[in-house]
Amino acid sequence: MSRRCLKVLIVLGATVLVACATSLPTSVPPPVRPAPPPLVYTTPDVSPVPAQPIAPAANDTSALLGDQMQTPLVAVDPWKQRGLASWYGKRFNGRRTASGERFRAGGFTAAHRTLPIPSYVRVRRVSSGEEVIVRINDRGPSHPGRVLDLSYAAANKLGILRLGSAEIEIELLTEEEWRFSPPTR
């Protein structure tokens, strides 16, 4: 390549660089970062759930670990229980529950060892008084010190996500009670 060609290429390159540099704005805005996804599933507080018959196959507790086999409750007498509740969430999304339906972390559901499937319970966090109504659709919890496993959304509503578990009180509701209870907000 001749010296003259090399000079022409250098001049052209410098011209292009100068032209590009002068067309840029004087201050470049920072890159736009997408907003992080929400930590909580956006679901309606209460979804109208049709009454479901108690499913005998879903009420088999033989799937529970070791000595935890217990007979499911069938009476509709007033019933309450107090103990620790934990929660299960995103990694169980889509897996089958004892009722046969797919688990939704954004739904207001729970797992209990002996309550009929389906049944509805009012869960009240003892320390704060927060309440939520959930549908029992699974068996559990497998942890021996706990009485209830809440869905991610229900645990969030009660404010126990960060804690992992909290003391709660469970009250079994009759069909009239859960159908005509005011929605939880």
Image (spheres, rainbow, N blue to C red):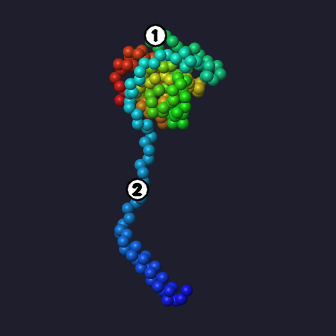
The residue at 56%/18% (across/down) is 57
Task: Judge from the rendering whether residue 62 lies leftward or rightward of residue 44; answer left or right.
Answer: right
Work out which residue is located at the far right of the displayed protein and give it.
Answer: 66
Q: Dot 1, how many residues are within 10 Å of its Cα: few (below 14), some (14-19), or many (20+)?
A: few
The quarter of the image holding the N terminus is bottom right
What SS does tag 1 mark? loop
Residue flagged by tag 2: what amino acid is it? Answer: Val
Picture disc at residue 77 = 1
| Residue 68 drawn at (x, y percent) | 61, 20
The residue at 52%/23% (across/down) is 99
Q: Mark 2 sits on what residue?
A: 32
The residue at 54%/36% (across/down) is 91
What SS does tag 2 mark? loop
Residue 145, compared with residue 1, is above or below; it is: above
Instruction: State which tag comes first along the sequence, 2 or 1.
Output: 2
Residue flagged by tag 1: what amino acid is it? Answer: Asp
Q: Is residue 30 visible?
A: yes
The residue at 48%/86% (across/down) is 7
| Residue 22 drawn at (x, y percent) | 37, 74
| Residue 131 drawn at (x, y percent) | 40, 25
